[in-house]
Amino acid sequence: MKKTILFFVVLLLLCVSCLFVGCKSKDKGVEFWYDKPMPEYEAILKQVIYEASGIPMTYIGYGNVASYQTAVQQTLRSPNAPGIFSWWSGFQLKALADNGLLEDLTGLWHDYLVPQGVSPDVAESLTFEGKIYAAPWAIVNDTIGYNKKIFNRLGLSEPTTFKEFLDICAKIKAAGIYPIGHHSASWGSFVWFQILIGSYDPQLYLDICNGDEKYTSERMIAAMQVWDDMLNKGYFSDPRDDWVRAFVDEEVAMAVISSGVTLGLTKDYGLQPVIDYDTFVMPSRNPENKGIIFFEVAPICVSVNSVQKEKAMEIMKIYFTKPVQQAFSDIYGTANTSQVVVLNPVVTKANAFTQDTDNYQSILRFYENTPAELRDVVITEMARFWARRGTINQVLAACQVKADEVFK
């Protein structure tokens, strides 16, 4: 009888051991979910992160945004939630934070991200109730790109004041060239709206985003009048699907550019950075205000309920070290930290602006910085304004109707 009991005890221990080994062999380490499959990114980052941490990564990319959002939202309350996942900033991120689904990353920012050269300004767009709930997977900074051949031919230099910028526009227009290129997509209407409101008063821009200022206020009307005057003088090109081609062909002299567009100018069109094109930040209309760099951030978060949370936090520490960020930059040309070496000097220059906090301020772009239902109305109204189918008072009144509904 004792031998039989001993046999079953040993058998039970072997089964438990096998189960443990089996589970361990299937350990995925940390799952990283995101909404765009990127095989090249996965292969390189897997290797670099594993070499630094010894933690295996499993990347799960979704090709459809709606499917991705549903999958994430259905798992975030369970232990099976991904350790790390990408999301959207602004009000979409706030919804997850308000429901207690995100790990607090405030300490991570102070101890690891900022010392590695991530701009502290980026944290503001990821902060709710004094806590930071995400880190930047990718940061895209928007600056003003200009065709240097046109500038050199007309004897122009980068503007240091808003008046100089308007004088440059006038001289370029007089030469028979469109000063500013304009994208035909309706969503593009918010780009110059935010630039010209931000250059008038950064706080005004922030106040309309969060409902503290009315669209119909005297300050908003005054800020819009400069844009109205620029449109009346023909400083903007006709809407174009391929405005980059127009920039390359010297049909337009300036345009809002991101790091991706900058790299494309060289890779796809053969323009040489600094020689053929360069960049500057729109000067403020008030010399006492800093120049504004509008940025888009694709955030990554840690699931507070995930069984992978502890390992995920270790990965997050490593993710912002120079080897990992350099590998990311080598693929996409963007830079999340000042430690990264970017081969394109125009991208490097744009990144340096974000580090010069004495003269420049980084602010989240309008698309993510206000509630989506209000944003969509404002974009529609600004497109109407751009097409000269509505006056300043008409479009701002329509925006305020929606703002009253959203911020009631």
Image (tube, rainbow, N blue to C red):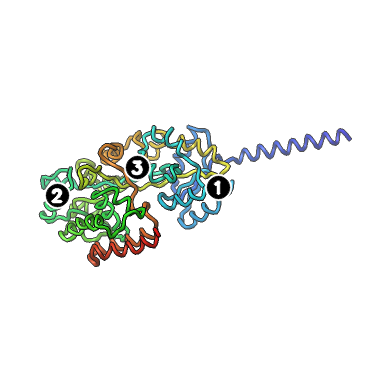
Using the image, tell me which numbered label, if any, was put on residue 168. 2
Circles 3 and 1 in contact, beta carbons < 8 Å: no
Residue at mark 3: 334
Amino acid type for the residue under numbered disc 2: Ile
Question: Crowding near pointer 3: few (<14 within 10 Å), some, many (20+)?
Answer: many
Q: Position of residue 403 (x, y in %)?
A: 36, 60
Question: Crowding near pointer 2: few (<14 within 10 Å), some, many (20+)?
Answer: many
Quarter of the figure with the C terminus? bottom left
Using the image, tell me which numbered label, if any, was put on residue 32. none
Question: Crowding near pointer 1: few (<14 within 10 Å), some, many (20+)?
Answer: many
Using the image, tell me which numbered label, if any, was put on residue 81. 1
How far is mark 3 from mark 1, CA to CA?
29 Å
Mark sitting earlier along the chain (3/1)? 1
Q: Position of residue 76 (x, y in %)?
A: 54, 49
Q: Residue at x 17, y 53 (%)?
A: 179
Circles 2 and 3 in contact, beta carbons < 8 Å: no
The one nearer the camera, 177 or 314, is 314
Amino acid type for the residue under numbered disc 1: Ala
Q: Residue at x 24, y 67 (%)?
A: 389
Quarter of the figure with the N terminus? top right
Q: Nearer the viewer, mark 3 or mark 1?
A: 1
Mark sitting earlier along the chain (2/1)? 1
In the image as oriented, which residue stretches furthest toward the bottom? 389
Q: Is residue 48 visible?
A: no
Amino acid type for the residue under numbered disc 3: Thr
Q: Nearer the viewer, mark 2 or mark 3?
A: 2
Q: Is residue 205 visible?
A: yes
Describe the element under mark 1 as helix, strand or loop. loop
Circles 2 and 1 in contact, beta carbons < 8 Å: no
How far is mark 2 from mark 1, CA to CA?
53 Å
Q: Position of residue 382 (x, y in %)?
A: 28, 61
